Amino acid sequence: MTDETHDPSGAIPLSPNTILVRGGLTRSQHKETSEAIFLTSGFVYDSASEAEARFKGEAPGYLYGRYANPTNRMLEERLAAIDGAQTCRLTASGMAAVTAALLAPLRAGDHVVAGKALFSSCRWVIETFMPRYDVEFTLVDSTDVEAWRAAIRPNTKTFFLESPSNPTLDVSDIAAVASLAKGCGARLIVDNIFASPILQRPFELGADVVVYSTTKHMDGSGRTLGGAILGSTAFMEEHIDPYLRHTGPAMSPFVAWNVLKGLETLSMRVERASASAARLADVIAAHPAINYVRYPHRTDHPQFELAKRQMKSGGTLLAFDLKGGKPAAFAFLDALQIVDISNNLGDSKSLATHPATTTHYSFAPEVQAELGVTSGLIRLSVGIEDCEDLVKDVEAALNATLG
């Protein structure tokens, strides 16, 4: 297969939008236009000595679908190129990526500092799963740089944060937290799923590792589950490769192919959805049924100035709190005609969810309150439908909460 990631002459550096279409592109001897799907679990060798050489790493080539696959490798190279990482590894889901990035480098007695505002499964891995193996943790207000500093211990090995966070869209100072991590010899892992690589580039802000659920904006059509870990070659080879090879959370080549095709329109979808989200945030904020709206590029967001520095736009998601609590939230969701009720996000279709009873239902009431997950909170993931159609749908649903 022929690598066509870069301009053959080497004279033209590729822009992000071109990388999204052509990054990592390889073609077989058939010279197909679209990326090929290699639906195979194994690979054959011309001789026993070739098999030995491949397993020793002395000859190029693939070994087994759980280790690597040509379709998957195209996606890994494309994601690494668009995010500015040395390399990338794929997993079967976003949570598989998070879990591998967190656990693979850690040992008993190590300490992790993480933001409190996290997806519930991320909190479970940190609060419930890691301590079973004697890994310690401290949860901090991710927006408070001094809280990160105060949490550092001699055995701190990893910092982990989401920015913007799920579901209240808190924005962390990635550069400041990265500086603290480097100062104590720890690595910073950033979950960049809400912003996507189109709107925020954590490596440029000092992150060591970036994780994604490719299920979200990258696929963009709600078809597949997948995850990605991006970072240095040394980090992957020392920590991630052995973990993935032996525990087996491999991405299907069919999933990788779907994500490759999704990346071709990622920039257009994210930019269109972000513009609609900004418009909807203003419309919702002006409605009498609302206590507040959280959208990173609105001036009333608590970290507005930081969000303006870190993010190209406010993103595709917003959150808002209804004055009528849970009854109003359910009335709003049930009145929607275009927007679907779903706990997914980053889809071409607009989706709304009630975090207190779905994504964050497992948290105790006091934890929900600490995170800002109120009974009236709605998280809205904006899609690429006509913006004014969405405005009419959301306004009508808000009106339905007023009785």
Image: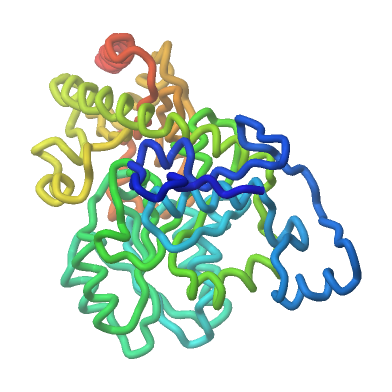
One can see residue 307 in this view:
yes
Give the residue at x 45% y 84%. Answer: 110
Give the residue at x 72% y 70%. Answer: 59
Give the residue at x 61% y 69%. Answer: 241
Give the residue at x 65% y 46%. Answer: 71
Q: Is residue 172 above or below residue 361?
A: below
Q: Position of residue 183 (x, y in %)?
A: 24, 82
- Identity of the residue furthest to the right in this view: 48
Res 283 → quadrant: top left
340 on left or right of 402: right
- Identity of the residue furthest to the front in this view: 9
Q: Is residue 354 above or below residue 309?
A: above
236 on left or right of 64: left
One can see residue 326 in this view:
no
Q: Is residue 229 above or below residue 14?
A: below
Q: Position of residue 240 (x, y in %)?
A: 56, 69
316 on left or right of 211: left
Q: Position of residue 205 (x, y in %)?
A: 24, 61
- Viewer-proximal residue, 234 or 305? 234
Q: Position of residue 339 (x, y in %)?
A: 41, 19
Q: Is residue 317 above or below residue 303?
A: above
Res 382 → quadrant: top left
